[in-house]
């Protein structure tokens, strides 16, 4: 099992267990509430704004001293914030090149496809691709 | 006619509570039947053949043209052009008018325009080095803390001078339902010899339109916001104004004579000059049926029903802590934008969707207006005559529940 499969599996299992759209919203709201977000106000700048989505979403990708991936992301949408948290769970702290396929696989989960517009999911896919080229 | 009787005319198989009528209304059964009948019985093009089905289709299109003229109280000397929608009509006007703009001239519009009545003119001004002047609204706060947005004719006319080539305004905002003081603007503009183009897309479903009395030079509508099919629009214009415009879409049906040797073309007069190619005949026939249906219901019944819905919606929303409405006052069209102090409008729309309530979140193709209001997005609720007070309650109850849940 690859590191991505290991990280993806529990998230996919949680999504599989959700019975409907409302249960998925509740799950995402819970994910959004998982502190800390560590997203300073000064990171909400124009250059960090992710284009292409009706909701505002900010993203800053960094590399730690230990050469691992740091993801700072936020959105004014609680549901998208929850989704960003899942992406963070999947990728943050990794020291090996990111595979955007894992994120794309996550976003293709039918429960998430029911909850978000194609435009919103496309924006998150783009984020996964940006992470792929960060390390 | 009661709301229940009106609802019977719209037998939708969807269980959704549809509160996004500002985007497109549902269609009455008669519209679907009329379009189906055309495809089954007399499916032919118009203006091309002289056989029976072509004659029947041609008569139906001509009848619709007269019906729309009646609906808009347009008179002789006023032309009715079928377009693909209000956006198409406004683009057609802007392209046709571009040559009349020049460096140093200006155009006046408002910050509340839908992009379809802003971008074509912005482009025209850029091309010709003309200035686009933008009028801004007055915002009052009502007793419940909601924002009431209105425009004064004076503020708009302040921007007009002897270099103004055209005024382009919406008759009704698609974000707040605010009715614009169109008559007061056209009166002054006529004195100054300035043409006025009106985006009537949000107007005609809620209020009787008298094109002649409005005094504008051209007005564009969309059939899909008027209980008709998608893919059809109406451009009503004074013939004297149309004569000043160059047709931009070229093709069949518009040519009187064509001299290939000398590269000379003479276009037909009136609406034909602007209707290149085949018309959307099924949509025209469907729209004719929609207008018959509206006549049957009666515009005063529509206004009364929608006023009740708007008042009830505002009452309910005003009582929810953390919700602020942005609207055009109690006499506006039934369109209300709202914001929440705890949730983004897109999240609210997602929760509504999960409960089978259709509302729209975003910038509503009116980015400058949302920027003026200082909102990244709003949730827009736009009920219409077939919605019920109970449906408004279901929506408001959900909003109340969400606010309580997330304000903790």
Image (cartoon, rainbow, N blue to C red):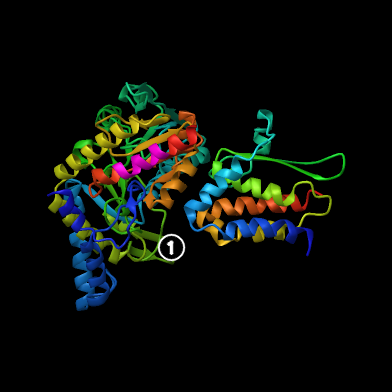
Q: Main secondary structure of the magenta part?
A: helix
Asked if the stretch drawn in magenta spans residue B406, the answer is no
Residue stretch rendered in magenta on the structure: B393-401
Q: In this view, does B135 lie to the left or right of A54?
A: left
Side of B362 where B27 appears, left or right: left
Residue placed farthest to the right in the image? A66
Q: Quadrant of the N terminus of chain A?
A: bottom right
- Residue A8 appears at what percent x and percent y? 69, 58
> Which is more toward the observer, B247 or B107?
B107
Residue B301 sits in which quadrant? top left
Task: Name which residue lies at 73% across and 61% down.
Answer: A5
On the image, the x and y values in percent for residue B361 come to 45, 43
Q: Position of residue A111 (x, y in %)?
A: 54, 58
Bin the neighbour count of mark 1 within 10 Å (Cα to Cα): few under 14, some 14-19, many 20 and up: few
Dividing the picture into quarters, in which one does residue B218 lie? top left
Q: Mark 1 lies on which chain?
A: B
Would residue B396 be counted in the magenta stretch?
A: yes
Residue B66 appears in the figure:
no
Which one is nearer the viewer's eye here, B49 or A7?
A: A7
Residue annotated with mark 1:
B262
Q: Relative to residue B319, is residue B268 depicted above or below?
A: below
Above or below, B332 against B225 in this view is above
Horizontal and vertical percent position of residue B136: 41, 26
Q: Please tell me whether mark 1 sits on a helix, a strand or a loop.
A: loop
Residue A83 vs B315, above or below: the answer is below
Depth order, front residue of B60/B382: B382
Task: Give left or right: position of A35 versus B43.
Answer: right
């Amino acid at each position: 099992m690859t590191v991505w499969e290991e990280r993806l599996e529990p998230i996919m299992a949680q999504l599989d267990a959700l019975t409907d759209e409302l249960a998925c919203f509740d799950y995402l709201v819970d994910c959004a509430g998982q502190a800390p977000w560590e997203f300073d106000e000064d990171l909400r700048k124009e250059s960090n704004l992710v284009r292409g989505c009706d909701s505002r979403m900010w993203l800053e990708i960094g590399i730690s001293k230990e050469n691992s991936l740091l993801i700072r992301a936020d959105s004014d949408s609680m549901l998208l914030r929850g989704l960003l948290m899942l992406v963070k769970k999947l990728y943050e702290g990794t020291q090996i090149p990111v595979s955007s396929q894992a994120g794309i696989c996550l976003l293709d989960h039918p429960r998430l496809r029911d909850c978000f517009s194609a435009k919103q999911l496309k924006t998150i896919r783009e984020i996964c691709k940006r992470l792929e080229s960060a390390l | 006619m009661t709301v229940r009787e009106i609802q019977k005319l719209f037998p939708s198989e969807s269980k959704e509570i549809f509160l996004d009528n500002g985007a497109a209304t549902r269609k009455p059964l008669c519209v679907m039947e009329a379009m189906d009948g055309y495809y089954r019985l007399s499916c032919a093009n118009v203006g091309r053949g002289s056989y029976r089905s072509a004659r029947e289709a041609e008569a139906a299109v001509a009848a619709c043209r007269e019906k729309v003229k009646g609906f808009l109280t347009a008179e002789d000397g006023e032309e009715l052009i079928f377009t693909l929608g209000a956006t198409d009509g406004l683009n057609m006007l802007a392209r046709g008018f571009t040559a009349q703009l020049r460096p140093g001239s200006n155009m006046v519009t408002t910050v509340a325009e839908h992009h379809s009545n802003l971008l074509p003119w912005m482009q025209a001004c850029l091309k010709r080095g003309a200035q686009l002047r933008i009028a801004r609204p007055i915002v009052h706060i009502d007793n419940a803390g909601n924002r009431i947005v209105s425009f004064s004719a004076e503020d708009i006319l302040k921007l007009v001078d002897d270099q103004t080539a055209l005024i382009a305004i919406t008759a009704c905002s698609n974000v707040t339902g605010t009715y614009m003081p169109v008559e007061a603007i056209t009166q002054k503009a006529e004195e100054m010899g300035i043409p006025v183009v009106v985006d009537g897309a949000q107007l005609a479903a809620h209020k009787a339109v008298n094109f002649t009395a409005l005094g504008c030079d051209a007005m564009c509508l969309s059939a899909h916001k008027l209980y008709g099919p998608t893919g059809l629009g109406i451009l009503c214009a004074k013939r004297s104004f149309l004569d000043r415009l160059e047709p931009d879409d070229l093709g069949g049906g518009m040519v009187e004579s064509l001299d290939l040797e000398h590269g000379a073309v003479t276009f037909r007069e009136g609406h034909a000059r602007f209707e290149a190619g085949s018309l959307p005949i099924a949509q025209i026939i469907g729209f004719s049926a929609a207008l018959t249906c509206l006549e049957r219901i009666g515009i005063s019944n529509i206004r009364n029903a929608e006023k009740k819905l708007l008042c009830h919606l505002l009452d309910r929303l005003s009582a929810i802590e953390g919700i602020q409405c942005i609207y055009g006052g109690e006499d506006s069209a039934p369109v209300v934008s709202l914001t929440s102090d705890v949730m983004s409008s897109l999240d609210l729309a997602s929760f509504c969707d999960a409960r089978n309530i259709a509302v729209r979140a975003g910038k509503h193709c009116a980015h400058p207006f949302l920027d003026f209001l200082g909102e990244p997005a709003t949730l827009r609720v736009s009920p219409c005559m077939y919605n019920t007070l109970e449906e408004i309650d279901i929506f408001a109850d959900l909003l109340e529940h969400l606010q309580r849940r997330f304000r903790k």
